[in-house]
Amino acid sequence: MLSYQHQYHAGNMADVHKHALLAWMLDYLAQKDKPLSYIETHAGRALYDLGSPEASLTGEAARGIGRAEQGFAAGHPYRRRLAEVRAAHGATAYPGSPLIAALTLRRGDVMHLADLHPQEHAALAVAMAPWGAHVRREDGPAMALALCPPTPRRGLLLVDPSWEVKADYETMPALMERVAAKWNVGVLALWYPILAEAPHAAMLGRLTAAFPDAARGALSRGPAGPPDDRVGPLRRQSALGHGRGGGRGRPDHRLSLTAGAARTAPSTAPPPPSARSPARSTAQPRQAPAERQERSSTECRSPSS
């Protein structure tokens, strides 16, 4: 599906939840003096302008990062990444997951990014050119299967499709299972939305059966009604809390299912100086995509070392 345009939704509460967790996980992995691989199957454009007509039309960023940012400690990896991106690209710049990863990874770490959408891929290639990432316009899940086990062996896979293709609820858990079989020391992270009709329910059951030692986390924005100005309605329902797997050859399965359920809307080291913000359309869209109810699920298998 090539219709989804994330610039309308960048910086919303689901982004805050997903990116805060991603920044924390990568920061934790980078503390060990061993190289990492970062693989992302649906990368998007990596750098967004929250002052763009697209972002302004939906107002999702104002209700997301605009309200939640101060709820994070100043030293949180997510806050540090935000500050670095703004210092390099301006006050309204917002990092997608590839740029969060690039800012956290070190010399010797490797990034593999894929996106099929022609405009998203073009912007991604521009934003990530200074970082030496491997950027591909190809099917992301196929790329992940071809790469795994990657070199370096330690690392993290982020799977974050648009979920506009209903078959994704079957193909994505199958992907996680296949990658896990090939890469038993990788951290696997899967984001998914929570919609009123609960298309994720069967998928979640399958994932739980495949990864029984997993942890599940959830964020909620509170009951339906006017937007709440507090960060308080965001709550972590469960957290990463499993110890390492016991014994050689036994991977540590961690499932961090992190959910940020949105109300139903009426209509939801700093970058090198050479890094350029991706081009964006200046034309005012006729109609903004509806904000989706969203929840993020991160299926993780932590490294065995």
Image: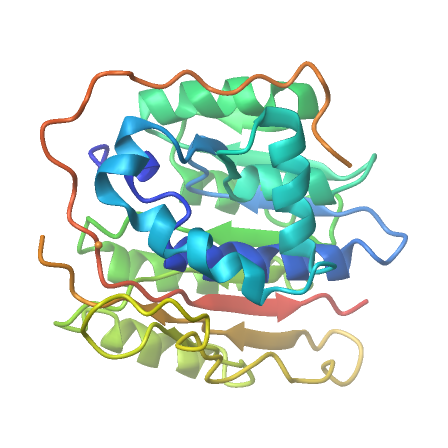
Q: Residue at x 72, y 65 (%)?
A: 303
Whether 298 is drawn above or below 12: the answer is below
Query: Where does the image place residue 173, in percent across and percent down from the top left?
Result: 37, 64
Query: Where does the image place residue 220, in percent across and percent down from the top left?
Result: 36, 75
Q: Residue at x 33, y 21 (%)?
A: 118
Viewed as shown, does residue 55 lie left or right of 226?
right
Number of residue marks: 0
Q: Is residue 114 visible?
A: yes
Q: Residue at x 23, y 43 (%)?
A: 58
Q: Nearer the viewer, residue 154 or 178?
A: 154
Viewed as shown, does residue 210 lie left or right of 254?
left
Whether 123 is drawn above or below 217: the answer is above
Location of the N terminus by quadrant is top left
Q: Nearer the viewer, residue 18 or 116?
A: 18
Q: Residue at x 41, y 24 (%)?
A: 121
Query: Where does the image place residue 238, in percent across and percent down from the top left?
Result: 50, 84
Location of the C terminus by quadrant is bottom right
Query: Where does the image place residue 138, in percent across and percent down from the top left?
Result: 40, 29
Viewed as shown, does residue 77 lie left or right of 40?
right
